[in-house]
Amino acid sequence: MKRLNFPWIAAGIGIVLAFALLHGGAAEPAGAARLPTLTLLFMSEFGFLVTAAGAFVGIRNRQQTDGRRALLLGIVCSILAAGFVVLGLMVWRGHMAA
C-alpha cells in the first residue's frame, strides 16, 4: 500500500519544491537570487530524484491499480522531474557565468 501512495507524496513534494525554487530566484539572474546557489542546486537535485522515483513507481503501479490514474500521476511526476532538470541547469549556468 505504501508504494501506491508514494507518487502522490512525490508530486506534492515536487510542487512545493518547484514553487520554493521559483520564489528563491532559480529562474532569475545570479545577482537577483534570494537563496544561495548551493541551496538552489540542492533543492533542484532533490526534487528531481524524488519526482523521478515517483514517476517510476507511478508508471509501474498502473498494472496493479486503476491504469489511468497511475499513468497520469507518473506523467505529472515526469514533467516535474524534467522541470527540475531545467531549473537546475538554469541555476548552474546562470550562477557560473557571473
Image (spheres, rainbow, N blue to C red):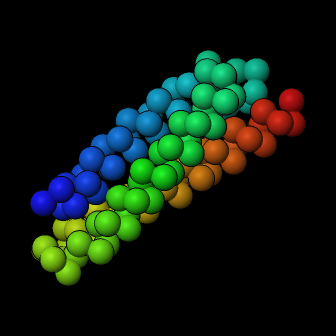
- Image coords of residue 44 (percent x, y): 56, 42
- Image coords of residue 75 (percent x, y): 36, 66
The answer to which of 18 and 2 lies nearer the viewer is 2
Q: Image check: 9 left or right of 51?
A: left
Q: Residue furthest right?
A: 97
Give the quarter of the figure containing the N terminus: bottom left
Residue drawn at (40%, 59%) of the image: 53
Residue drawn at (74%, 30%) of the image: 29
The answer to which of 36 and 90 lies nearer the viewer is 36
Residue drawn at (50%, 43%) of the image: 46
- Which quarter of the figure has residue 64? bottom left
The answer to which of 28 and 88 lies nearer the viewer is 88
Q: Image check: 31 left or right of 56?
A: right
The correct choice, above or below, for 94 with respect to 55 in the image is above
- Image coords of residue 21 (percent x, y): 53, 33
- Which quarter of the figure has residue 90? top right
Q: Is residue 80 in view from this perspective?
A: no
Q: Image check: 19 left or right of 35?
A: left
- Image coords of residue 97 (percent x, y): 87, 36
Q: How many marks?
A: 0
Q: Is residue 29 in view from this perspective?
A: yes
Q: Residue furthest bottom?
A: 63
Residue drawn at (41%, 54%) of the image: 51
The correct choice, above or below, for 90 with respect to 76 in the image is above
